[in-house]
Amino acid sequence: MKSVIRLFVLLCIAPCILLCAFTFDSDSSLKELTLPYINTYECIRATLGGQDLLDDFEYLTITLEDSNSLEVSFKKKDGRRHSYSCNYTVDEQSGELCAELGIMGFRFRQKTKIENGSFTLCMTLLNRPLVMAFKAK
């Protein structure tokens, strides 16, 4: 009889021990495992010809919404908000992100590499170098 009680107690405790050995993150999802680059990236540095541009903005973000669409959104300090959408591709082998965005009649095509949750965009705008660094939120 004692062995039956011990076996019963062991069978009740074993699942508890196993469940405590694993942690489940409520924010995790299958998307993070299959498309880890899908995220919102916040601009942490933006310069145009050496002049800091972030002083004029409350935020500037790029959100990779799903496997092929992204949204660029920003809010200026004067309260005006804007957002633009476009499609993108990611080479899963190299981590290279490629997107083409139209803003105010201009088309911008950029390629960059996502590494450790961040990437940098570099281009010439108005004959001056524009450098923008983004980091995952």
Image (spheres, rainbow, N blue to C red):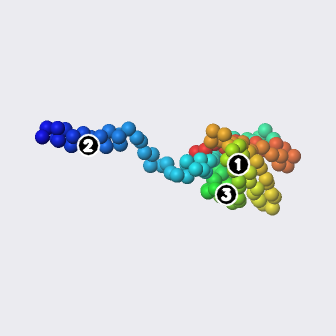
What residue did someone put label 1 on? 91
- Element on which disc 1 rests: strand
Q: Residue furthest right?
A: 127
Residue appearing at x 78%, y 38% in the figure: 50
**Relative to 110, is 44 on the left or the right?**
left
Query: Could you tell me residue 54's position as x and y percent?
Result: 69, 44
Three-letter amino acid code at disc 2?
Answer: Leu
Query: Could you tell me residue 12's position as x and y percent?
Result: 25, 43
> Mark 2 touching mark 3, by CB under 8 A?
no
Report crowding for label 2: few under 14, some 14 to 19, many 20 or more residues within 10 A (C-alpha): few
What residue did someone put label 3 on? 68
Q: Earlier in the sequence, mark 1 or mark 2?
A: 2
- Element on which disc 2 rests: helix
> Mark 1 touching mark 2, by CB under 8 A?
no
User: For the residues carrying marks 1 and 2, which lies nearer the camera in this image?
Assistant: 2
Q: Earlier in the sequence, mark 2 or mark 3?
A: 2
User: Is residue 84 positioned above or below 114 on the image?
Assistant: below
**Relative to 125, is 19 on the left or the right?**
left
> Disc 2 versus disc 3: distance between alpha carbons?
48 Å
Three-letter amino acid code at disc 1?
Answer: Asp
Q: Residue furthest left?
A: 1
Q: Which of the numbered marks, if any, corresponds to residue 11?
A: 2
User: For the residues carrying marks 2 and 3, which lies nearer the camera in this image?
Assistant: 2
Q: In terms of depth relative to the viewer, which is nearer, 65 or 131?
A: 65
Which quadrant of the structure image shows residue 79? bottom right
